[in-house]
Image (tube, rainbow, N blue to C red):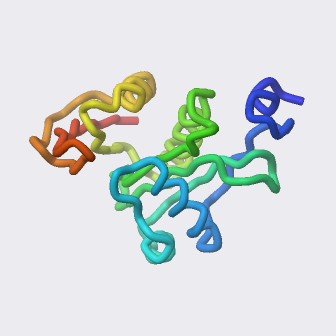
Amino acid sequence: MSLLGTLLGGGKAPHLRDARASDSVDLARIHAASFHRGWGADEFERLLAERAAHAHVICDGPDGAILGFVLSHVVVPEGEILTIAITPRARGKGLSGKLLSHHLGRLAARGVTTSHLEVEAGNTAALALYRRLGYGETGRRKAYYQTADGTCDAVVMRRDF
């Protein structure tokens, strides 16, 4: 039994795999628990059906529940992370770093040499993760995100592989 598996209560090491259309309901549930405006299952089905979409999930073992996901839009040589989310119960355990590292490795194998993303300026955990993985700030979009308290700037980031 892995330490991470014990921390998650499932007793299994996390498992990474490509996201499937059949995951759409779970992705929508996780997204809704993570963002002010969650995307619906129909939006995830449509996105995952697009040729340019590349998504991965991290699960509680090979047949376990989805704990998080990442979704990018790719037009080689560039990719843009559209969203990444981890279930509330699995946050703070290093899963997002493992998931994002896996995802970026898969994108690099497809010929991606640059990854872009936008993140809420107040999301310190996400900003720290992206900086640890080599992203740097390239700009800001003022009042870009709607939040429960009004608006928040978006930090635009880039990573070259």
Image quarter of the C terminus: top left
Q: Which residue is depicted at the point 39% across and 50% down?
A: 35
Of residue 92 and residue 103, the one placed in the foreground of this image is 92
**Residue 134 picture location, percent across and down:** 39, 26
Q: Position of residue 107 (x, y in %)?
A: 49, 50
Number of on-image labels: 0
Give left or right: position of 131 versus 27: left
Q: Position of residue 23 (x, y in %)?
A: 62, 66
**Residue extending farthest left:** 142
Q: Quadrant of residue 18?
A: bottom right
Q: Residue at x 79, y 33 (%)?
A: 5
Locate residue 25, reporting x and y percent.
58, 68
Quadrant housing the N terminus? top right
What residue lies at 45% left-to-right and 65% top-to-bottom?
A: 53
Q: Which residue sits at x=19%, y=40%?
A: 152
Choose between 136 and 120: the one closer to the eye. Answer: 120
Does 139 sit left or right of 98 as displayed? Answer: left
Q: Is residue 44 above or below residue 1?
A: below
Residue extending farthest to the right is 1
Residue nearest the viewer, comparing 12 with 151: 151
Look at the picture and state if 78 lies above or below 53: above
Q: Quadrant of residue 10?
A: top right
